[in-house]
């Protein structure tokens, strides 16, 4: 009997220890449920993070385009189709001022102006339609980690220089240091030296995107002094769409978030999340019923003891709390057991689900926050489940209980 | 003069059985002074346990007044009643009714623990002294469920004394024990009564034991039919 523990804690732990078999079984049951939820959550969030990462490797969170554009230029190079615009590219009005305003928004992590448009890359006999993307590398890399994706050379796009994808290099039979002729529909053309090769992990982007300096692109695309879009990274990428709508309303420009651009992918993510919440709910419900039924039995079995405690002066409130605590303790211990089980499962899973070269397919783990949420949630479920049995215990008539 | 430990006036108790009301206690008047050692006898079904439960504040009367140490109890709210009962009245039951999940010592501590909320060293010492007083010092850390019937009843007596109650109610405390053990237990109650001046009201079916009390109250069909002092007074 620890001196600092109140009566309710002492009685709750003693009762659980005395009914050892029942307690262990129900803790095991809760543990299995929590393990299932934790494993599923970790797997899904790992999978999701992996997909999101791949998607965002070549896309900005949010892109601002000129207003009143009837046919929008494909601003997603990864999915760009061969679509040469008949009309001239338009620039965003007063984009420098807009850029300054955007940089001040607390939600925005990075802002990068981009001049992009369709063009052709020619080398010898080979001729490919490409998306020419003019960037300021020091800003652009904070929106898209292009510098991390360079596999040869460097991300260097001074005048007369270009960085192309591995796929395009293969198609054109070009490599570092080779020259490339770029021409656009407006009739402009330039010969650029390949200074870097990138691999965005996306075949289309690797085959189409050609990064050049902002000025180079502006002159090639007949967009001198202008930009076709402003790409941005935000802190909360899932809040990108709400922010996009706000900016569109404020500026009258078109603002597209990656969420909108990848609507289909997002619908899949959302429905996955909804279905995993449904699973969570039902697992929690079955754990709650398990805890409740064990405690109901315990209250019946302990009717005499409860009566005696009442005769000793224990109040209804003390008994109510004693049984609520038992529910909470079962939930907490079950969730800890479950987190442990889930970690073991994941360790096993990581050794099994590997790529051919032995590296894990993608990283998943049970994050500390998930353990805390599981512990808190399971404790709460335990207390709620104990509500009915605890009220029964508190309502017990000591006279009837003692008479047996 | 100090208030009597217990005063009942016109206590009635009815139970609802189907459509009809069954009155099992018909206006009981009874006063118990400090240090009295009284037996409550009567045939089975006469209402002895019902009366004891009312006095112990485990149940509430349908009518009449019940005073503990001069305090009227019928007007007290539920929670107060429970506390008052726990503090001023000790209970010893026929079926020992210890709490098996706890040791002998912890069972003795229980009334103190529920009253104060959390354990402390003084509580532990008091419980140990009480256990020693009933001859079970060496069983203090035994689980209650591992003790013999006589030992359990001794623990129950020690527990009934934990709060230094003015009154101890015992409902057939020796009913489940053999004659020899019953005599020991009865002697123990008497000893406590003489040493501490605690009042006792003891329900018993055993005329031999009743004869060893100062006073014998007889209940028949829910009414007191006789209330007489007994010759063998404490000396
Ligand atoms: N909860 C109840 N509901 C209905 N009737 C009850 C209830 N409790 C007791 N009674 C009735 O009250 C009467 C007195 O019962 P009580 O238990 O007080 O008798 P007793 O004198 O203690 O008997 P015994 O010596 O057998 O223990 C009995 O007729 C019993 O059936
Ligand atoms: Mg009885």
Image (cartoon, rainbow, N blue to C red):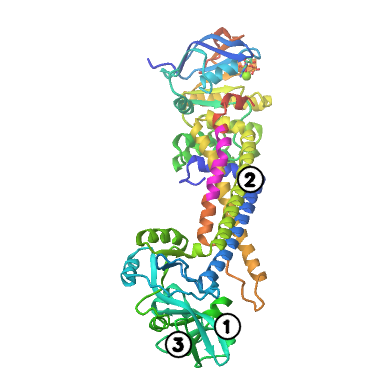
- The residue pinned by badge 2 equals A286
The chain ID associated with circle 2 is A
Residue lying farthest right?
A: B178
The residue that label 1 is drawn on is: A167
Q: Residues within 10 Å of mark 3 (few under 14, many from 20)?
A: some
Instruction: Provide the residue span drawn in magenta.
Output: A377-391
The image quadrant of residue A54 is bottom right
Q: Can you say whether A114 is above or below A318 in the image?
A: below
Element type at mark 3: strand
Residue B141 appears at what percent x and percent y?
Answer: 58, 43
Comparing labels 3 and 1, the label whose residue is closer to the camera: 3
Tell which subunit mark 1 falls on: A
Give the distance between the C-alpha atoms of the residues marked 3 and 1, in whole angstroms.
22 Å
**Residue beneath label 3, please?**
A189
Q: Residue furthest front?
A: A86
For the stretch drawn in magenta, the main secondary structure is helix
**B219 and A128: which one is in front?**
A128
Q: Is mark 1 within 8 Å of ligand 1?
A: no
Tell me where residue A97 sits by quadrant: bottom left
**Quadrant of res B151:** top right
Verify CB contact (< 8 Å) between mark 3 and mark 2: no
Looking at the picture, tell me which residue is in the foreground, A387 or A128: A128
């Amino acid at each position: 009997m620890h001196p600092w523990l109140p009566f309710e804690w002492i009685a709750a732990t003693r009762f659980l220890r005395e009914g050892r078999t029942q307690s262990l079984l129900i803790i095991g049951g809760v543990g299995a449920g929590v393990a299932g939820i934790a494993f599923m959550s970790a797997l899904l969030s790992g999978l999701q993070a992996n997909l999101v990462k791949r998607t965002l490797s070549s896309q900005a969170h949010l892109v601002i385009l000129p207003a009143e554009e009837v046919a929008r230029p494909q601003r997603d190079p990864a999915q760009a189709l061969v679509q040469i615009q008949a009309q001239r590219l338009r620039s965003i009005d007063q984009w420098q001022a807009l850029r300054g305003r955007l940089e001040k928004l607390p939600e925005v992590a990075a802002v990068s102006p981009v001049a992009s448009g369709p063009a052709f890359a020619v080398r010898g006999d080979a001729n490919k339609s490409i998306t020419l993307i003019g960037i300021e590398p020091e800003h652009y890399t904070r929106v898209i980690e292009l510098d991390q994706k360079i596999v040869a050379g460097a991300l260097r796009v001074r005048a007369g220089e270009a960085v192309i994808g591995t796929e395009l290099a293969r198609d054109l039979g070009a490599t570092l240091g080779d020259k490339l002729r770029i021409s656009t529909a407006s009739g402009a053309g330039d010969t650029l030296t390949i200074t870097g090769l990138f691999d965005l992990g996306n075949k289309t982007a690797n085959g189409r995107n050609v990064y050049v300096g902002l000025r180079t692109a502006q002159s090639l695309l007949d967009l001198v002094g202008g930009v076709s879009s402003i790409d941005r990274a935000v802190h909360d990428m899932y809040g990108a769409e709400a922010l996009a709508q706000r900016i569109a309303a404020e500026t009258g420009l078109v603002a597209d978030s990656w969420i909108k651009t990848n609507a289909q992918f997002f619908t899949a993510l959302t429905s996955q999340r909804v279905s995993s919440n449904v699973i969570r709910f039902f697992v929690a419900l079955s754990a709650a019923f398990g805890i409740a039924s064990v405690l109901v039995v315990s209250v019946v079995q302990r009717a005499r003891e409860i009566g005696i405690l009442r005769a000793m002066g224990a109040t209804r409130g003390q008994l109510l709390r004693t049984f609520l605590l038992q529910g909470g303790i079962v939930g907490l211990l079950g969730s800890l057991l479950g987190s442990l089980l889930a970690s073991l499962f994941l360790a096993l899973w990581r050794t099994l689900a590997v790529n051919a070269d032995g590296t894990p397919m993608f990283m998943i783990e049970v994050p500390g926050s998930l353990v805390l949420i599981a512990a808190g949630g399971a404790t709460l479920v335990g207390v709620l489940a104990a509500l009915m049995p605890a009220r029964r215990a508190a309502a017990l008539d000591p006279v009837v209980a003692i008479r047996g | 003069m100090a208030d009597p430990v217990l005063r009942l006036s016109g206590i009635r108790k009815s139970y609802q059985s189907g459509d009809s009301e069954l009155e099992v206690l018909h206006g009981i008047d009874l006063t118990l002074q400090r240090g009295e050692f009284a037996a409550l006898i009567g045939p089975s079904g006469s209402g002895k346990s019902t009366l004891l439960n009312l006095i112990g504040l485990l149940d509430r009367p349908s009518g009449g007044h019940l005073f503990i140490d001069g305090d009227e109890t019928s007007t007290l709210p539920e929670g107060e009643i429970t506390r008052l009962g726990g503090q001023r009245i000790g209970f010893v039951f026929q079926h020992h009714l210890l709490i098996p999940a706890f040791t002998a010592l912890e069972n003795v501590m229980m009334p103190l623990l529920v009253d104060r909320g959390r354990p402390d060293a003084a509580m532990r010492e008091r419980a140990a002294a009480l256990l020693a007083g009933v001859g079970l010092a060496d069983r203090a850390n035994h689980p209650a469920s591992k003790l013999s019937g006589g030992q359990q009843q001794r623990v129950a007596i020690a527990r009934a004394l934990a709060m230094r109650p003015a009154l101890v109610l015992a409902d057939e405390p020796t009913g489940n024990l053999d004659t020899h053990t019953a005599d020991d237990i009865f002697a123990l109650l008497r000893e406590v009564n003489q040493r501490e001046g605690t009042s006792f009201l003891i329900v018993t079916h055993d005329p031999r034991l009743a004869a060893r009390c100062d006073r014998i109250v007889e209940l028949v069909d829910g009414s007191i039919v006789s209330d007489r002092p007994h010759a063998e007074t404490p000396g």
